Image: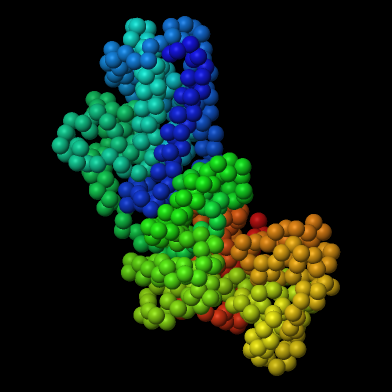
Amino acid sequence: MISCWSLHLLILCSLRGLVHVLWSSYSHMLFLNRYRTILQQGVDFKQIDLEWDWDNFLILEALIGSMACYVFPFLQDLPVWNVKGVIAAMILHVGVSEPLYYWVHRKFHEHHFLFKHYHSLHHSSHVPGPFTGGNATLLEHLVLTVVIGIPVLGASMMGYGSASLVYGYVLIFDFLRCLGHCNVEVVPDEIFQRFPLLRYVIFTPTYHSLHHTDKNTNFCLFMPLFDALGNTLHPNSWQLHKRLSSGSGNNSRVPDFVFLAHIVDVSSCMHVQFYLRSFASLPYRTRFFLIPCWPFALLVLLAMWLWSKTFLFSFYYLRDRLHQTWVVPRCGFMYFIPYATEGINKQIEEAILRADRIGVKVISLAALNKNESLNGGGKLFVDKHPNLKVRVVHGNTLTAAVILHEIPQHVDEVFLTGATSKLGRAIALYLCRKKVRVLMLTLSTDRFHKIQREAPAEYQSYLVQVTKYQAAQHCKTWIVGKWISPREQSWAPRGTHFHQFVVPPILSFRRDCTYGDLAAMRLPQDVKGLGSCEYTMERGVVHACHAGGVVHSLEGWSHHEVGAIDVDRIDLVWEAALKHGLRPVSLK
């Protein structure tokens, strides 16, 4: 294998890791394969953590490969290609590796001690994925190393080994292992219809998923022939594969609730499960490893702008209700380009109409998708389509409730930016009813007086218009609804706490002040299948507008929540959220 065998081992390990990562990326591309997904439960955080060190077996097998190169010196000087080695390896694989793996694997299941102490770890991953193959005990990895090594080492000992054989066999082996665990049926049934015997030569993802659900059948490595000979072939293997490969197996479930999100920026667009599952399972932070990928991500975003439509991004289950997140393929800065607004509204409208057509009950609009200047907080679509059965929700009522309940009860004065926005108006009107003095930063006297007139007469004096940040230099509670620069933050006195409902969040510039996160709530503890974090939120936490849609769905409310916030419903929505088990982020 050329003299530098250590370099080849390093390259081979890298390629093997890449095979697993690419398969993982594909299996999480719900917009491509949702109708051919086999098990619908969803990979949750618990399974992701369980499989976090999935690549340990690559290190183990690299170390064993290094020892093999010392023990068998002929492995250090293999030719590039030898066709006889390919034939020898195929014979050894079918004649030795396949039956050996089948026998050992079956024993792992038939003997309670072996299963409990060695193989149950692998089956603790309830939804198979490409990384599930690496979630196993040391004994299992050693057995698999022997199974892989027999054809390669055997052919080399016969004098037929080659570098191409080592690379080819090991990478094909990993490719097929990932195929079996990918949880997406990619093998077309037409192949088996034309060549019926082929179904005994190569397994399918459906075939192996039946092993993970049944556990007493389908033990083979790659060839179902050995299950047929051992009378352990699941009777539903071929029928289920035919149904799933056609794309008609799992397309009947309609989501009860849809959260219509958008891309925030170029860097955060890589915070997705089909890029790196482990990265997406943690709150988004800028990472150095993202920098080399930034140009490619930008090109993808531009291509999506030109050709893509709203797509399915993620899902989870809550009390047997399917909740999905759809993404409008537009980045945050695009919402502020005047000639792009019409196209964005068209994307949102098509998503709402699609949700209405398939029977979704509630669709909630995220952040910029409900921008007042864009579509009036969703009112544009409701007015245009008065017969919508799907309820359109901006979720701002709960957002306002979250912000208001974060303010300590002893506070008697706040400074509010973005005061004339939907949220700013509702927060100001609510606080003045609580006899809290609200310094509303706005240059528009007409808009200020319009809001002031909405307040009961006895509370109007609690609303005060200010036009400069200097007016708030003695106020320690700032509610930020409009992005403020570090210079503007400098007017806040020491010890100020910045509450905020602005996207993106303001920079944490002041070390002598504290900064609140965006309004958010923790989902109920009985949520299932959730395996990705929503932007910078912690695990299990979603933006308040997302949570507002969830509450709307759980309550079964029949009204649209669009346009201006009904201040009288703020406490009602907050109490409904708590009733259904949603919790403020401050409560763990």
Most distant residue in the bottom direction: 457
Q: Is residue 475 above or below residue 567?
A: above
Residue nearest the observer in this picture, 274 or 176: 274
Left or right of residue 434: residue 116: left
- Residue at 19 percent across and 41 percent down: it is 190
Q: Is residue 492 above or below residue 96?
A: below
Quadrant containing the N terminus in the rendered view: top left
Label total for image:
0
Closest to the observer, 410 or 387: 387
Foreground pick, 198 / 157: 157
Decide which of 284, 408 is in the foreground and name it: 284
Residue at figure coordinates x 54%, y 37% from the top left: 52
Q: Quadrant of residue 585?
A: bottom right
Q: Where residue 250 appears, x then y in whole percent?
A: 31, 53
Quarter of the rendering occupied by the C terminus: bottom right
Residue 449 percent coordinates (x, y): 67, 89
Apparent side of residue 473 relative to residue 566 in the rendered image (left or right): right
Residue 32 in the image, given as x and y percentages of width and height? 36, 50
Q: Residue furthest left?
A: 194
Seen in the image, is 258 located left or right of residue 396?
A: left
Q: Residue at x 71, y 75 (%)?
A: 416
Residue 549 appears in the picture as rendered: no
Q: Quadrant of residue 418?
A: bottom right
Q: What colouring does the structure picture have?
A: rainbow
Q: Residue at 56% x, 51% y: name it.
A: 267
Asked if one can make out residue 418 in the rendered structure from this viewpoint, the answer is: yes
Q: Is residue 118 above or below residue 572?
A: above
Residue 218 picture location, percent across and down: 31, 33
